[in-house]
Image (tube, rainbow, N blue to C red):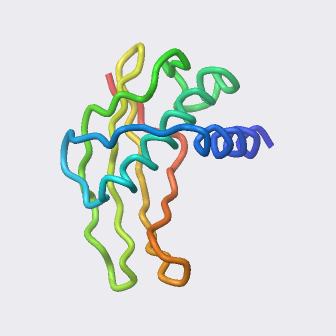
Amino acid sequence: MKTFIILLITSILASCSTVSPPTEGQSMADSRLASDVVSQLNSTERAYAVFAQDAPGAAGASNLRGAQILDRKIVSKPDASGKWAEDWTVKRDSGSARYRINFIPTPDIGGTGMTIEHPPTLLK
């Protein structure tokens, strides 16, 4: 239930913000999709900091600033359906966290969707 609440709040907050796309590392996401990822990561980091401080992967999350992207790395190229995955590393108050982002083309409605795997991998 706690995870559902975090994801719900994350989705609501993400729909209210706009951000500049990151340029660090390598990504196959265009600037619009990259901005969407950053918005989701901003909201996710805030949700961890405010609502789930004791959750796995929450250590060092901050709700005081937006997610600062330290690196992006393509971990799997598009498969036959066009799906691919990337790791995005976010700076935290204590260390950093790496999120796996799964990109899923949505040809029936246009564009590309994404999912963020939880919890993130904590890095020092």
Quadrant holding the N terminus: top right
77, above or below 13, in the image:
below
At which x and y percent is residue 115? Answer: 52, 57
Q: Quadrant of the C terminus?
A: top left
Q: Is residue 37 left or right of residue 12?
A: left
- Relative to 81, is 16 on the left or the right? right
- The reply, left or right, for residue 88 in relation to residue 49 is left
Closer to the camera, 103 or 97? 103
Looking at this view, name the residue that lies furthest to the left.
Answer: 25
22 relative to 104 in the view: left or right: left
Which residue is at 68% across, 43% downward? 12
The residue that appears at 26% across and 61% down in the rendered structure is: 28
Q: Is residue 92 above or below residue 40?
A: above
Residue at the right extreme of this rendering: 1
Residue 44, position as x, y percentages in the image: 56, 36
Above/below status of 84 relative to 73: below
- Disc count in the image? 0
Q: Work out whether 109 lies above or below 35.
A: below
Task: Provide residue 121's location: percent of width, then percent of height.
Answer: 42, 37
Residue 50 x/y as whole percent: 66, 21
Q: Which residue is found at the position 36% from the left and 50% from the top?
A: 34
Which residue is at a point 34% across and 43% down the rendered structure image? 88
Foreground residue, 61 or 124? 61
